[in-house]
Amino acid sequence: MPRPRTHDEALRLKLLDRAGELISAEGPKALSLRKLAADVGTSTTAVYSLFGSKPDLVTALYMEGFRRFQARMARLEPTGDPAEDLVRLGLTYRESALTDPQLYSVMFTKVVPGFEAGEEAKDLANSALAPLVHTVRAGIEAGVFADVPPEVIAVSSWGLVHGLVTLELNGNLPEDFDVASSYESALRANASGWRR
């Protein structure tokens, strides 16, 4: 009978989530493979077996964040209204960030000094953001959005959602601020502002 595999996908995901939590809460210096293994109740051998080195672990963390983000974006079916689709993408961006805040900073900030995503990781990140560019292009081609380079609308929209989500995750919004409805209102104003 084959030996049961103890270094499985569930352990890999548990280690990635805990690594992200350590980086988010305490900074990248808090991420030691020994501490990570102890926190998850496994051995450093398991960490090395699953990821290789600490830089490989950070790459895996970055890629896992974009895999989850991409899966959420892919669930959105186009409505036929590019402006509404742009709003829905922004809402999904926030949902993804709030669901996996431990991955968000690794994905979208330079929280780990010296970390550079490799080509495979960059390709994954770009493909995860492709629905935004696709939606904007479709809106321009349909005459819904202004006739400007698609990157102008896409990057501006991304900047808006990233800024608001980062403020929320960092606790920089006023205490009595209605984040959810204000966020959606900002997304709708942005989409309307780009209408032709």
Image (cartoon, rainbow, N blue to C red):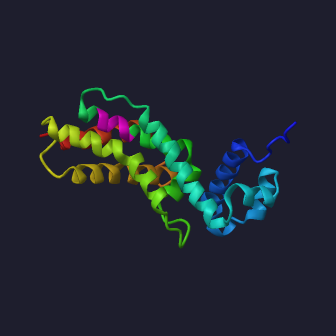
Q: Give the total of numbered labels.
A: 0
Indicate the position of residue 99 as horizontal and vertical percent values.
55, 41
In the rendered image of this protein, does residue 77 appear above or below residue 145? above
Task: Give the extent of the magenta segment.
Answer: 85-90
Is 106 displayed left or right of 167 in the figure? Answer: right
Q: Is residue 108 visible?
A: no
Instruction: Give the residue displayed 49% in from the left and 49% down from the top.
Output: 66
Q: Which residue lies furthest to the top in this view?
A: 79
Q: In this view, does 109 lie above or below 129?
A: below
Instruction: Please state if 1 lies on the left or on the right of 30 as rendered.
Output: right
Q: Position of residue 138 (x, y in %)?
A: 22, 38
Magenta highlight on residue 87: yes
Give the quadrant of the C terminus.
top left
Residue at (63% x, 60% y) in the render: 57
Q: Nearer the viewer, residue 49 or 25?
A: 49
| Residue at image location 23% in from the left, 49% down from the top | 153
Residue 37 in sight in this render: yes
**Is residue 31 part of the magenta span, yes or no?**
no
Considering every residue shown, the one lying at the far bottom of the view is 114
Drawn side of residue 94 relative to residue 7, left or right: left
Q: Nearer the viewer, residue 87 or 132?
A: 132
* Image coordinates for residue 131, horizontal then vertical, percent: 34, 41
Q: Where is residue 143 in the image (x, y as percent from the top left)?
A: 12, 36
Residue 92 lies in quadrant? top left
Q: Is the magenta stretch mostly helix, strand or loop?
A: helix
| 127 w.r.t. 135: above or below | below
Q: Which of 37 and 109 is in front in this view?
A: 37
Question: Looking at the image, which residue sits at the far right?
Answer: 1
**Horizontal side of residue 21 vs 80, given as left or right:** right
The quadrant where residue 10 appears: top right
In which quadrant is the N terminus drawn? top right
